């Protein structure tokens, strides 16, 4: 998330530049509490839907971690069914009597000299110890109920370990993403805050300008009555008042727009009145003298996320290698049925241990290895590119701070001289020794100096925040 304040802050400066300068007057600013920059950032973080959505990524990562560990734990599955057949089917399996009759037929022709000792079954058959006959067995009932319970687990799956490690790393990336979103939100709020401060100061300047234009009009009317001014001077003075009034109203509208936008970011009612500090301060004043190396920038959240992504890419290579390792699984199943079937029993169980080893898959694994290694190299190059961008952002922010501080010093001197010049010209104009054009020039010089100071102060504050963001030191929790 990144917002530009140029439309607000410098737009307000452009509005101010349309009117002549004024002496101090009662400014027209919104009432209400004064909200500090730290408070604005804190409330925006607390009420941001984007940040709340980002935090849900952590909850998702925790759920994915539990799912990953589920691959190592046993599973239990239950199944049940009911079957209604169109008819009952029986099969004659043959009874013990049939078996004994077959044995008796063989025993009558048994030759002990050639075939060995007479089997004991022949003695049982001759004694007629069994009289059971054959019976038909039901193999399909009209109504059949079946149920089973299976307990199993993966005994060996080498791919599980790099996958679980990647899930842990994914959770770390989710946490870094929350911090990164917080930094971006804090930076956007800071831009808006400085925009509101600029608009407030613009309203103050224009209110002073209107009062000065009215005062100069009164001076012109006095000169006109004394016969030392022309009618066109009175018209120009009235035009200045009309223009000052118009630009003041435009500045108020600009202030209201940027203030309502900031209120929405803070989760406040946009109709509620509040003010911001006229000269916001940041915790990073004087940071332009700080020299940062590549290692110092390693704490940036975007670089840390890229480091984690590179680590996950390296594990993807390990995951491909683990596909060459066989998998081993075990299961135990207990089943019950209302139909005894051929086994002549209602329940049964079985244990299973399976070994799965895929030896060749058309060379796709070697292609997967090449793809995974290319992704590792890509992630490292992306990290190097991000580091170059970070170093560039730091240098640009440092240059902006140095430039803004120099501009602020120059603008302060120019404002002091412009105010002194305007005071002298006003005395001369009142005494009738200075023409109205000289007074207008003095007014324009003063307003240029005021705008220059306001612009330099705004740019300096934004450059300090930009430097902290580029250096990875923008901690929204300590935005003091």
Image (tube, helix red, strand yellow):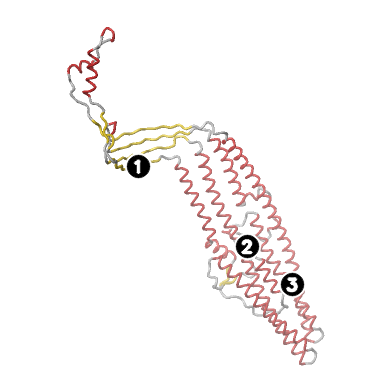
Q: Is residue 330 left or right of residue 131?
A: right
Is residue 380 rendered to the left or right of residue 232?
A: left
Residue 230: x and y in percent read: 79, 89
Q: Residue at x 32, y 42 (%)?
A: 81
Q: Is residue 64 above or below residue 133?
A: below
Q: Which residue is mark 3?
A: 449
Image point (59%, 37%), residue name: 369
Helix, strand or loop status at disc 3: helix
Give residue 3's mark.
Answer: 2
Between label 2 and label 1, give the one nearer the viewer.
1
- In the depicted view, which residue is nearer to us: 369 or 198? 369
**Residue assigned mark 1:** 79
Residue sticking out furthest to the top: 113
The N terminus - image quarter: bottom right
- Give the crowd class for mark 1: few <14, some 14-19, many >=20 residues within 10 Å: few
Q: Quadrant of residue 457?
A: bottom right
Residue 321, above or below 130: below
Q: Provide the secondary structure element on which disc 1 rests.
A: strand
């Amino acid at each position: 998330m990144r917002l530009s304040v140029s439309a607000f802050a410098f737009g307000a400066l452009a509005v101010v530049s349309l009117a002549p300068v004024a002496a101090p007057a009662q400014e027209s600013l919104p009432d209400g509490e004064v909200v500090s920059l730290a408070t604005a950032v804190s409330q925006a973080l607390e009420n941001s839907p984007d940040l709340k959505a980002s935090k849900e990524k952590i909850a998702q990562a925790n759920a994915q971690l539990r799912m990953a560990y589920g691959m190592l734990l046993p599973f239990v599955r239950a199944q049940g069914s009911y079957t209604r057949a169109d008819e009952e089917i029986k099969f004659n399996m043959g009874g013990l009597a049939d078996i004994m009759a077959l044995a008796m037929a063989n025993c009558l022709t048994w030759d002990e000299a050639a075939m060995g000792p007479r089997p004991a079954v022949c003695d049982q058959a001759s004694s007629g110890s069994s009289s059971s006959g054959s019976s038909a067995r039901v193999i399909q009932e009209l109504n059949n109920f079946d149920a089973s319970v299976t307990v199993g687990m993966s005994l060996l799956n080498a791919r599980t370990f790099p996958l679980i490690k990647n899930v842990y790393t994914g959770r770390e990336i989710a946490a870094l993403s929350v911090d990164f979103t917080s930094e971006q939100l804090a930076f956007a709020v800071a831009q808006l805050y400085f925009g509101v401060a600029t608009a407030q100061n613009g309203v103050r300047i224009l209110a002073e300008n209107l009062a000065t234009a009215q005062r100069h009009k009164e001076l012109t009317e006095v000169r006109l009555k004394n016969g030392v001014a022309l009618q066109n001077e009175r018209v120009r003075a009235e035009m200045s008042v009309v223009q000052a009034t118009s630009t003041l109203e435009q500045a108020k509208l600009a202030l209201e727009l940027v203030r309502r936008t900031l209120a929405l970011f803070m989760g406040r009612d946009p109709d509620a009145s509040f003010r911001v500090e006229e000269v916001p301060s940041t915790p990073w004043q004087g940071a332009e003298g700080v020299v940062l190396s590549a290692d110092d920038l390693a704490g940036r959240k975007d670089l840390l996320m890229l480091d984690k992504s590179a680590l996950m890419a390296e594990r993807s290579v390990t995951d491909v290698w683990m596909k060459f390792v066989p998998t081993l699984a075990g299961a135990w199943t207990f089943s019950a049925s209302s139909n005894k079937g051929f086994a002549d029993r209602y329940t049964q169980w079985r244990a299973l241990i399976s070994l799965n080893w895929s030896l060749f898959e058309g060379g796709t694994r070697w292609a997967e290895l090449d793809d995974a290694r290319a992704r590792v190299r890509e992630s490292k190059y992306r990290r190097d590119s991000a580091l170059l961008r970070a170093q560039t952002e730091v240098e640009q922010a440092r240059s902006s701070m140095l430039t803004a501080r120099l501009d602020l010093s120059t603008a302060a001197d120019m404002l002091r001289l412009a105010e002194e010049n305007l005071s002298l010209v006003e005395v001369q104009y009142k005494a009738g020794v200075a023409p109205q054009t000289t007074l207008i020039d003095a007014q324009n010089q003063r307003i240029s100096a005021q705008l220059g100071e306001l612009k330099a102060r705004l740019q300096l504050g934004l450059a300090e925040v930009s430097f902290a963001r580029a250096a990875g030191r923008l901690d929204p929790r300590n935005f003091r």
